[in-house]
Amino acid sequence: MLAAVYLNCAGEGTADADGYVASGKSSGRLMNESDYIVPDVLASGLITVFCGRAPSPESARQRAYYAHFSNQFWKILAETGMTDRQFTPTEFHLLPKFGIGLTDINKTESGSDHELSGSGDAPMTVYEKIKIHQPRILAFNGKNNCRMFLHAVFREPKNLPIDYGIQESYKVGDTKIYLLPNTSARARAFWQPEYWRSLAVMHKDLLNA
């Protein structure tokens, strides 16, 4: 069984006024994990790490991932066989035994995209975490999260047109990037579970290899 690691990825170097490292090995936003609303679930040897934008108010209240009753995250993991049953949000720490990890772009604010100030957005810190742990797949739960990451890391336009599925042009070391339809109820009009099913096939093949 893989052990979950709750990790502070500040790295080395000195930060400027915006919290970005100007020198040293890390280029991420400096954060203390004690400031995180919900801890990262990261470990070496993971297959898929899911990345959202920020916890919902309900997730912040429960200090658990995807905790609103209308979010489909835990349901789709079970339906696609990525987990052996439908977990409750507070059981998120059990996911590494299925090769799954969790993180967010913004660890210090909660709410929908339009409710966030953006002061806690730290896509470069996600990049540093993925560089360290090198999961096989970094899966973004929603287009806005993925665009933010691609803009910060690869200098792509903020409104980059992107399709769901593997992002063939981008990798973090050996980690592939996969874009998924958002599981939030607010994105229900764009829900396409076939992309989650395709990811699940990839995930299980790699897990059992």
Image (cartoon, helix red, strand yellow):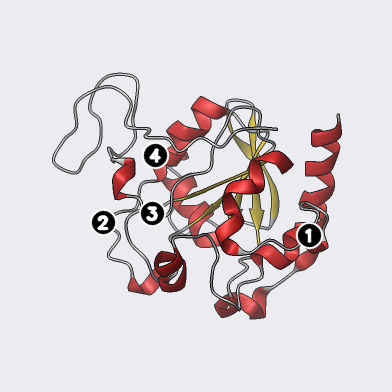
For mark 4, does the 10 Å Cα neighbourhood hold few (<14), some (14 to 19), or many (20 or more) residues?
Answer: many
Give how far apart the Cα atoms at labels 2 and 1 are.
36 Å
Residue bearing the label numbered 3 = 106
- Residue 47 lies, with reference to residue 150, above or below; the image says above
Q: Nearer the viewer, residue 154 or 88?
A: 88
Among the two numbered marks 2 and 4 on one chain, the one whose residue lies closer to the N terminus: 2
Q: Secondary structure at mark 3?
A: loop
Q: Which mark is residue 124?
A: 4
Mark 3 in CB contact with mark 4 (< 8 angstroms): no
Q: Which mark is residue 85?
A: 1
Among the two numbered marks 3 and 4 on one chain, the one whose residue lies closer to the N terminus: 3
Give how far apart the Cα atoms at labels 1 and 4 are.
33 Å
Q: Which mark is residue 131?
A: none
Give left or right: position of 129 versus 30: right
Mark 3 in CB contact with mark 2 (< 8 angstroms): no
Give how far apart the Cα atoms at labels 3 and 2 are.
8 Å
Q: Nearer the viewer, mark 3 or mark 4?
A: 3
Q: Quadrant of residue 143?
A: bottom right
Among the two numbered marks 3 and 2 on one chain, the one whose residue lies closer to the N terminus: 3
